[in-house]
Image (cartoon, rainbow, N blue to C red):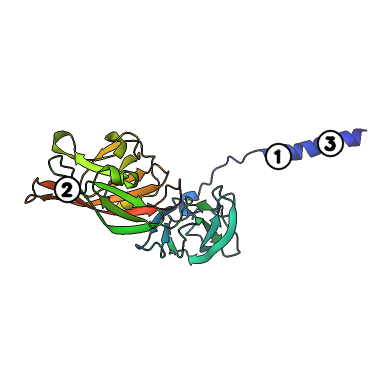
Amino acid sequence: MFNAKIRILIFISGLLLLTLPFTGSDCNSSNNPPAPSTGGVAAPPNVSLVINSDSTGLHSTALVSWDASPDENLDSFSGYKVVTYKVDENHNVLATHQVKNLPSSVHYFTVDSIGLNSRFETFVFSELNDGTESDSTGTLMYAGVYYWADGTIDEYQPGDTSFIESAYGWNIQTGKGTNYLFNSTNAGMIDMIMRGGENDSLTFYSPNRFSPGTRSTKFLKVGPGQDAFDETYLSEPDKDSVRVDSNYVYLLKTTDGYYIKMWVKSIRFIANAIPPYHNVIFDYKVQPIEGLKVL
């Protein structure tokens, strides 16, 4: 009986020792390279994503980049592994799309051949020479997009609307946008109209602002330039109108739940027309998967 009690106490003490956290410090840590994380090696942080494509949508790619792992300077660090999966809308893996091993000096990779109607996720791992892998750092779920550089829309002028195409709409299946006269014949195809706004500004409007019962579009002003056009971590559009500014990027959500990104490249004043009006030129990306806000 006495020996049994001793054995039980020793066993319990062992459990206590195993569960006590280590709180000691390394006096020489400032002179040593960082040690591997608890999982063996630290994962690469700050994985980012940019979707690129041409007008056909058949050559979409995903540029995935990341910051260096905190353990990258270890002698045992071999590099990074980039794994891309085809997934369903609930992030369940359907198939492995691509696996690539990269040296430690490389912090980016382009995933090729991402389809327009398939969803993908890419995960980046750190690796040691013995095959030890870190936890993964993943991207958003993404897919291929259409990209066109031919968008154009006129400023609505009530004095003469026989030639001024102040409306615009997108065919989601082809990714192609078309400018229209703003009238009842075209109402079912129009996602956006442009008119003068407050303080002599130009404004993009949802069509139902002026024609109740027509299509409803929400807008978000993302920011200026290429960085905004490449941004994939996007808030939800929630405005039914937005000021038009040159070099600014806008995210639109259509009545049908599809997302479009526009980049206003120039604003021209057509002075010799009667009446004179403004014309806006823009690039755009179209995401043909309903509800997917990464483009």
Residue of label 1: 17
Which residue occupies the foreground of this view, 159 or 197?
A: 159
Determine whether label 3 and label 1 are within 8 Å by CB: no
- Asked if the residue under mark 2 is in contact with the one under mark 1, i.e. CB atoms within 8 Å, the reply is no
The secondary structure type at the circle numbered 2 is: loop
Farthest residue to the right: give it: 1
| Disc 3 element | helix
- Residue beneath disc 3: 8
Q: Is residue 77 left or right of residue 173?
A: right
| Residue at horizontal 35 percent and vertical 54 percent from the top | 285
**What amino acid is found at the position of numbered circle 2 in the picture?**
Ser
Residue occupying image coordinates x 51% and y 52%: 137
Q: Amino acid at mark 3?
A: Ile
Residue 162 - label: 2
Report the Cα–Cα distance between label 1 and label 2.
85 Å
Q: Residue furthest left?
A: 272
Query: Local crowd at mark 3 within 10 Å, few (<14), some, or many (≥20)?
Result: few
- Of the pair 214 and 184, the residue shown nearer to us: 184
Name the amino acid type tagged 1: Leu
Image spot of residue 31 (x, y percent): 46, 53
Viewer-closest of 48 and 9:
48
Viewer-nearest residue: 79 or 21: 79
Question: Residue sitting at 13 percent across and 44 percent down?
Answer: 160
